[in-house]
């Protein structure tokens, strides 16, 4: 009897502590609801654990270390959001930003990943500064809505092209630049292994399951495609597959990583090659200013849109319509980008998938803390991450791209001076293979069209300044 009394007392004290930390009663929620909401959000965004290492390993950074960095960076950032801002929001390395980091800054521009991490750190510091001053409001107010929507959509189109390329659906063509691949080709060989039909199937499955609101649609779609691919290696003859020579750790007959189980105790020494390796001094270059600005813009606009959307769904407004705790949530998000740099992560940002947890009742930071704890558990799933074929995971990349491009529906399609710069921004990001160039073209187009149509009064001081900066970039910094 005494033991039962002690247990009940401890349970009561725990609930009391949670009540004081997260104000559960005030937000009309409870422990069970918050934990379930956290689990829901984690499942919907857990694909980042597998996708981010696949993308960023193209920089030469080790896959194992990137997987641990993704899990730990997301965990720390999300727990910080929960404890400091008391918001039900999950954070992780940003999709689009990781691709810009890998294929633009390191790939096209030729900078080392250490210097690229340095630019992420500097953009994060600027974001923190803006979040604790009035500059955040000035930035959000001075940049027109059309360009903000276009940046999100453009990043989506950029990701979509990458997804099509990684799965092997789109291939280089000497006559037409790009062309559709042979959909019967299966090159199970490396993290970016190409299997066009299966990659497209992964995208279709995820989309159908998401439309039907199936719990964990992304993970289920990846899982079904992976199982189907494994089954094919048993049914079809070995000669049917093309195995990459570089796939040293893959089973030679199938092209997949040899099965060694789904779980393993993490070896945190794998983090050593990328931990605290940001070259901040090397990032202090005039040529890298557009890169820093790009990281900052995409991060701040994406974050602001996500947080305000989640706040509306979670009913976090006060009686005057103002969003409670928005300033704290932005500070937590901006600080997370700086912290994530230490682990070797691209900018860590708030995920729109947080709306999934909110939809099942998540209202407080306890939801976020639950998400963060699940990301910590995720470090044990490295064997699973290495076993998943690239084409199955990259189907999710195409799906995420389509979601991001839906922001174009918010454009004013009756005003050429609004939608033309937005479309220019979106298209140029993909066609120049650079998010930075897309943003630059968009701002320049916006300013020129407004001036040429006698709408100069609609150009803010911030847009004027950035237009001059981007013109100077093309004149003086083009290689």
Image (cartoon, rainbow, N blue to C red):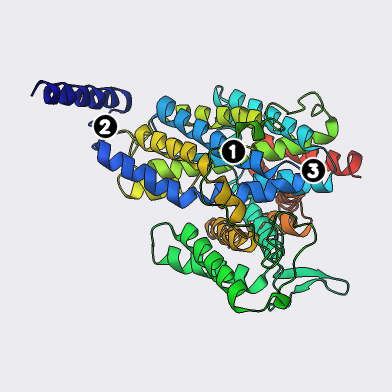
Secondary structure of the residue carrying numbered label 1: helix
Where the N terminus falls, by quadrant? Answer: top left
Disc 1 target residue: 68
Mark 1, Cα crowd under 10 Å, few <14 / some 14-19 / many 20+, is many
The label shown at residue 175 is none
* Point 67% across, 65% down: residue: 167
Which tag, 3 or 1, sits closer to the chain's start?
1
Give the left or right position of residue 218, taking residue 198 as reference: left
Q: Is residue 6 above or below residue 420?
A: above
Which tag, 3 or 2, sits closer to the chain's start?
2
Q: Between marks 3 and 2, how big is the CA–CA gap?
A: 45 Å
Where the C terminus falls, by quadrant? Answer: top right
Measured from the top left, where is residue 94 in percent x and y?
A: 60, 43
The label shown at residue 24 is 2
Give the left or right position of residue 272, taking residue 171 as reference: left
Answer whether residue 218 is visible to the viewer in this image.
Answer: yes
The label shown at residue 106 is 3
Disc 3 versus disc 1: nearer the observer: 1
Residue 458 versus residue 404: which sits nearer the camera? 404
Measured from the top left, where is residue 75 in percent x and y?
A: 50, 35
* Point 57% across, 68% down: residue: 230
Secondary structure of the residue carrying numbered label 2: loop
Measured from the top left, where is residue 275 in percent x and y?
A: 67, 29
Give the left or right position of residue 89, taking residue 257 as reference: left
Answer whether residue 455 is visible to the viewer in this image.
Answer: no
Q: Is residue 451 above or below residue 25?
A: below
């Amino acid at each position: 009897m005494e033991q039962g009394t002690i247990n009940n007392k401890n349970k009561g004290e725990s609930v009391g502590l949670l009540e004081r930390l997260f104000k559960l009663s005030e937000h009309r929620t409870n422990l069970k609801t918050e934990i379930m909401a956290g689990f829901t959000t984690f499942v919907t965004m857990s694909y980042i654990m597998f996708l981010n290492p696949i993308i960023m390993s193209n920089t030469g950074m080790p896959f194992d270390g990137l997987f641990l960095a993704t899990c730990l960076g997301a965990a720390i950032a999300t727990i910080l959001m929960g404890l400091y801002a008391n918001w039900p929001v999950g954070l992780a390395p940003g999709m689009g930003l990781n691709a810009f980091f890998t294929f633009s800054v390191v790939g096209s521009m030729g900078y080392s990943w250490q210097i690229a991490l340095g630019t992420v750190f500097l953009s994060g510091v600027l974001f923190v500064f803006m979040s604790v001053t009035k500059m955040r409001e000035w930035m959000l107010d001075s940049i027109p809505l059309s360009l903000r929507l276009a940046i999100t959509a453009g990043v989506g189109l950029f990701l979509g092209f990458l997804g099509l390329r990684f799965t092997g659906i789109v291939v280089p063509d000497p006559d037409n630049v790009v062309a559709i691949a042979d959909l019967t080709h299966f090159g199970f060989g490396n993290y970016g292994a190409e299997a066009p039909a299966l990659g497209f199937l992964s995208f279709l499955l995820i989309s159908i399951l998401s439309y039907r609101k199936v719990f964990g649609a992304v993970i289920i779609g990846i899982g079904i495609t992976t199982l189907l691919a494994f089954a094919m290696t048993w049914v079809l003859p070995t000669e049917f597959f093309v195995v990459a020579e570089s796939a040293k750790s893959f089973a030679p007959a199938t092209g997949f990583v040899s099965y060694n189980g789904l779980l393993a105790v993490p070896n945190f020494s794998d983090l050593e090659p990328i931990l605290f390796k940001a070259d901040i001094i090397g990032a202090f270059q005039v040529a890298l200013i557009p890169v820093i600005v790009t990281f900052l813009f995409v991060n701040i606009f994406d974050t602001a849109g996500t947080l305000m959307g989640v706040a509306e769904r979670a009913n976090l407004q006060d009686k005057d319509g103002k969003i409670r705790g928005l300033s704290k949530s932005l500070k937590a998000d901006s600080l997370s980008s700086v912290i994530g740099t230490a682990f070797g992560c691209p900018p860590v940002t708030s995920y729109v998938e947080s709306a999934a947890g909110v939809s099942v009742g998540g209202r407080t930071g306890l939801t976020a803390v639950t998400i963060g704890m699940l990301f910590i558990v995720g470090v044990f799933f490295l064997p699973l991450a290495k076993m998943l074929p690239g084409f199955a995971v990259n189907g999710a990349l195409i799906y995420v791209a389509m979601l991001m491009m839906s922001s174009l529906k918010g454009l004013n399609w009756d005003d050429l001076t609004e939608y033309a710069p937005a479309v220019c921004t979106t298209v140029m990001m993909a066609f120049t293979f650079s998010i930075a160039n897309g943003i630059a073209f968009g701002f320049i187009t916006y300013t020129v069209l407004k001036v040429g149509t006698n709408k100069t009064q609609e150009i803010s001081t911030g847009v004027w300044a950035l237009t001059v900066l981007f013109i100077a970039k093309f004149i003086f910094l083009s290689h």
